[in-house]
Amino acid sequence: MPLVVTGSVGFDSIEVPSGEKREHVLGGSCTYFSAAASFHGPVRIVAVVGKDFTDEQRAVLAHFGVDTKGLEARDGKTFRWGGRYHANMDERDTLYTELNVLGGEPPRVPEEYKDADVVFLANNPPRVQLDFLEQFPHKRFVVADTMDLWITTARAELEQLLTRIDGLVLNYDEAELLSGKQNTVAAARDILEKGPRFVVVKKGEHGCLFVHREGIGALPAYPSERVVDPTGAGDSFAGGMMGFLASHDVDDLGRFDAVYAALVHGTIIASFTIEDFGLGRLQTLKRQELLERLEAFVKMLRVPGL
């Protein structure tokens, strides 16, 4: 089924505890999401970049077979973000954020994208996410991401969005802020009351909690030995999840077992993303490697004797 992601494409500056630093790394929510989703099938992006976005960067997206007709180039500079990771690699400080062209009017959805069945609304102001939704008249399954800024400054619009989506993906702190509850399960259940069928709460190196109207699930993170750069892990996680779902032509993508299986695929692709800066590891990833790690993870989840 056609999969579309709306969000950001940008350049990152990343500092890690080893002292290593990388500048001008291709990043953004759409970038990581689409690269991860591409391992399951075609994906289209809707985003905006500046005139400094070169053919070299477009070639990276082309490597993953991403449809970039919805990548709109405007006068000005591309979105930029800089961050420094703490020693535990699970926390970071934002050094700067330059919206640049991302601060203007959101891009329009190309006509040929409007037949999309499956839509992921990556992090954006809720009003922008709501506007995007209106441009997909044939949507069947919609999942969104959000952040603490919108929970604090645009709660009314965010709660309106929650009534119109199937699922929400957010981290633990955001779930607590949105619900007012410190317990992760209680927080997710509170969010379900606001509209979505399921909530995925990301917990970094501790995996994720999945609360659905049909039940509860939890997954650990894959036990990675090599963690170079966690940037984009959450977006890759979402891309792997949504790519898997979009590749299955079933009547109800949002049912409990379908989403739970998709989370396993999201977990595995994210475990590769963190092994290098930017999209470096995903660019060299072979499908056989992906399948072998998936098999090992599924085996790890089984409890002998039960």
Image: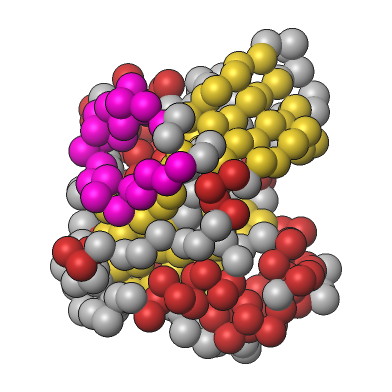
Q: Specify the quadrant of the image occupied by residue 38.
A: top left
Total marks shown come to 0
Q: Residue at x 42, y 45 (%)?
A: 74
Q: Where are the magenta residues, as a range?
A: 53-75
Which coloring applies here? secondary structure
Q: Residue at x 80, y 28 (%)?
A: 86
Picture coordinates of residue 294, whole percent (x, y): 36, 38
Picture coordinates of residue 22, whole percent (x, y): 60, 17
Whether residue 121 appears in this view of the structure is: yes
Q: Is residue 261 above or below residue 255?
A: above
Q: Residue at x 36, y 49 (%)?
A: 72
Q: Residue at x 51, y 40 (%)?
A: 76
Whether residue 244 appears in this view of the structure is: no
Quadrant of the image for the N terminus? bottom left
In this orientation, which residue lies closer to the viewer: 74 or 2?
A: 74
Outermost residue toward the front in this view: 75
In this orientation, which residue lies closer to the viewer: 86 or 203?
A: 86
Q: Specify the quadrant of the image occupied by residue 156.
A: bottom right
Taking the image as shown, residue 174 lies to the left or right of residue 58, namely right
Q: Is residue 154 above or below residue 289?
A: below
Q: Is residue 250 above or below residue 264?
A: below
Taking the image as shown, residue 270 lies to the left or right of residue 19, namely left
In this orientation, which residue lies closer to the viewer: 194 or 137?
A: 137
Picture coordinates of residue 237, whole percent (x, y): 47, 47
Residue 35 within the magenta-colored segment of the rendering: no
Picture coordinates of residue 114, whole percent (x, y): 23, 70
